[in-house]
Image (tube, rainbow, N blue to C red):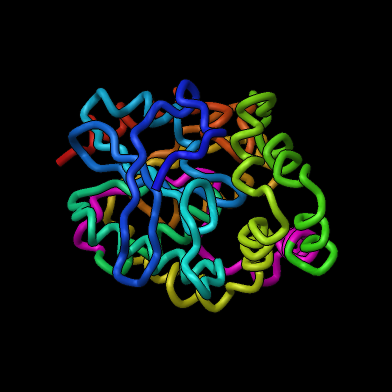
Amino acid sequence: MHRPAWVDDDLYPFADRWAALPGGAVVHHVDEGEGTPILMVHGNPTWSFLYRDVIAGLRADGFRCVAVDLPGFGLSPAPPGYGFRAAEHAAVLAELIAQLELDGYLLMGQDWGGPIGLAAAGRAPGRLAGLVLGNTWGWSMAGRPAAYVWAHLLGGVPGRLAVERLDGVVGFVLRRGARRRPPAGAVLAHYELPFPTAASRRPVWTLAREVTGASDFLDRDVAPILAALGDRPALLPWGDADPVFGDADRDRLAAALPRARVHDLPGAGHFIQEDAGEEVAAAIRAWWAAERP
């Protein structure tokens, strides 16, 4: 497979790798640097491009940075019959962890990257050394009104039609979700160009619907794993200007992870990697230097 012409080598200066997995998925990822593996998992509607500043800040400083594109996002094609649901993404990610033999790795997840990454890690918890969870969650959203509004607006019939027919929905989400440095120009284009057609945008509205539609997955495959990983060191880099996840979510994660250290990112929004990528990388370096076995 080849890098599309629209990818700017200066903005995304990493070697492309594709892993053919047993379940049939072919997953694009970057694998840069040497040292402690850190698996970076994106959410909706982003891809590994989101982590470019974090990778740049870690790959030369004792970290092996593995940033994945979930099927249907970024440069990863979707296998036939793939439904883009959270549980499917977690299964694919678990296969990638096994194929890359990531032992002693750190899991970094933001947005859907948190619960999907936790569910994948739970299939082989002995490989996991620590957690970096920022502006994410690990439990069912049942009973949370804002979650239902989001799931039905973007994941319901009106949202599906808007996502499929309007080119600007992905850009709108990114601009609203990054507060310090809302993406524009070529950076914004790198989030919009992976979704050129109505069919290619199905992953976006599917994961939006999953916010409430995947309650069983979150209750069964994510929340128990989060609880079971309470003995692992954790870093919680947290943007305090996030319109999606607030202090209560940060505190709930911290309560579930007794060894967690909170790193507040004042003024940063939901997409902390866009708003504060270099700061997040520096926080990871300092935290892991203190926690490394």
Q: Residue at x 54, y 57 (%)?
A: 72
Q: Residue at x 21, y 29 (%)?
A: 62
Question: Residue 224 versus residue 109: which sits nearer the camera?
Answer: 109
Which residues make up the magenta segment? 125-154
Q: Quadrant of residue 153?
A: bottom right
* Residue furthest right as drawn: 158
Residue 104: x percent and y percent?
19, 49
Question: Residue 126 versus residue 236: which sits nearer the camera?
Answer: 126
Residue 85: x percent and y percent?
55, 69
Q: Quadrant of the C terminus?
A: top left
192 lies above or below 150:
above
Labels in figure, total: 0
Residue 22: x percent and y percent?
29, 70
Q: Quadrant of residue 229?
A: bottom left
Residue 147 left/right relative to 251: right
Residue 181 left/right relative to 234: right
Q: Quadrant of residue 40?
A: top left
10 lies above or below 177:
above
Q: Is residue 244 visible?
A: yes
Residue 280 left/right relative to 124: right
* Residue furthest left as drawn: 293
Q: Residue at x 48, y 47 (%)?
A: 75
Examine the structure image and report whether residue 20 is included in the region drawn in magenta.
no
Residue 83: x percent and y percent?
56, 72
